Amino acid sequence: MYSPLQMAADLPEHYERNMAPFRFIKDVAVDWDDTKILKAAIGDYIITARKAKGTDNWFLGGITDENARTETITLDFLDSGKTYEATIYEDGPKAHWKDNPTEVGIRTVAVKKGSQLTMKLAAGGGFAISVMAR
């Protein structure tokens, strides 16, 4: 469903203890030139990529059901000959939807067309990635 409104679903006091992941909410676009479903299984998980309108920046998101999983994403949709900086917001090593829902890791890597990212999704977890053209 299209909506230019961005939001974080939960009580604000749950986020006040760890504001770093909100950088993604600040950076993410609200209008898109392209949307790609990279991987999905109905009722299990989905990984989506969206290109911000009028830019070379992409935003990826993935979410899983109650089952932890590892997925490799190939960034073959990026423009050839360009270098990008990917900021990855991911489940921490001990993250779990019920027992440890707030453990988040943030890392930055250089990527280009064809780069692969291996994402570990905790049970009930997910990730967000901003891919900014340099």
Image (tube, helix red, strand yellow):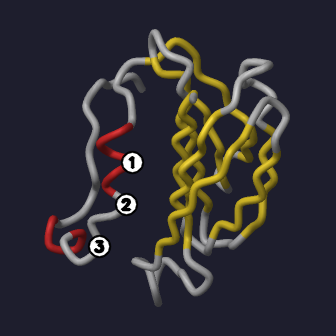
In the picture, the quarter occupied by the C terminus is: top right
User: Which residue bears the numbered disc 2?
Assistant: 21
In the picture, the quarter occupied by the N terminus is: top left
The residues tagged by marks 2 and 1 sit, at their Cα atoms, a distance apart of 6 Å
The residues tagged by marks 3 and 1 sit, at their Cα atoms, a distance apart of 13 Å
The residues tagged by marks 3 and 2 sit, at their Cα atoms, a distance apart of 7 Å
At x 29% / y 42%, what residue is drawn?
26
As rendered, which of 3 and 83 lies closer to the eye? Answer: 83
Tag 1: residue type?
A: Phe
Tag 2: residue type?
A: Pro
At x 37% / y 60%, what residue is drawn?
21
As rendered, which of 79 and 50 lies closer to the eye? Answer: 79
How many marks are shown on the rendered structure? Answer: 3
Q: Position of residue 42 (x, y in %)?
A: 68, 46
CB within 8 Å, label 2 to label 1 = yes
At x 47% / y 21%, what residue is drawn?
52
User: Any mark on residue 18, and which?
Assistant: 3
Q: In this view, does 33 lie above or below 21?
A: above
Q: Position of residue 114 (x, y in %)?
A: 85, 34
Tag 3: residue type?
A: Asn
Mark 3 or 1 closer to N-term? 3
User: Which residue bears the numbered disc 1?
Assistant: 24
Q: Where is residue 24 in the image (x, y as percent from the top left)?
A: 39, 48
CB within 8 Å, label 3 to label 2 = yes
Q: Is residue 40 left or right of residue 7?
A: right
Crowdedness near tag 3: few (<14), some (14–19) or many (≥20) residues, C-alpha within 10 Å: few
Q: In this view, does 83 lie above or below 91?
A: above
Crowdedness near tag 2: few (<14), some (14–19) or many (≥20) residues, C-alpha within 10 Å: some
Q: What element carries label 3?
A: loop
As rendered, which of 134 and 104 lies closer to the eye? Answer: 134
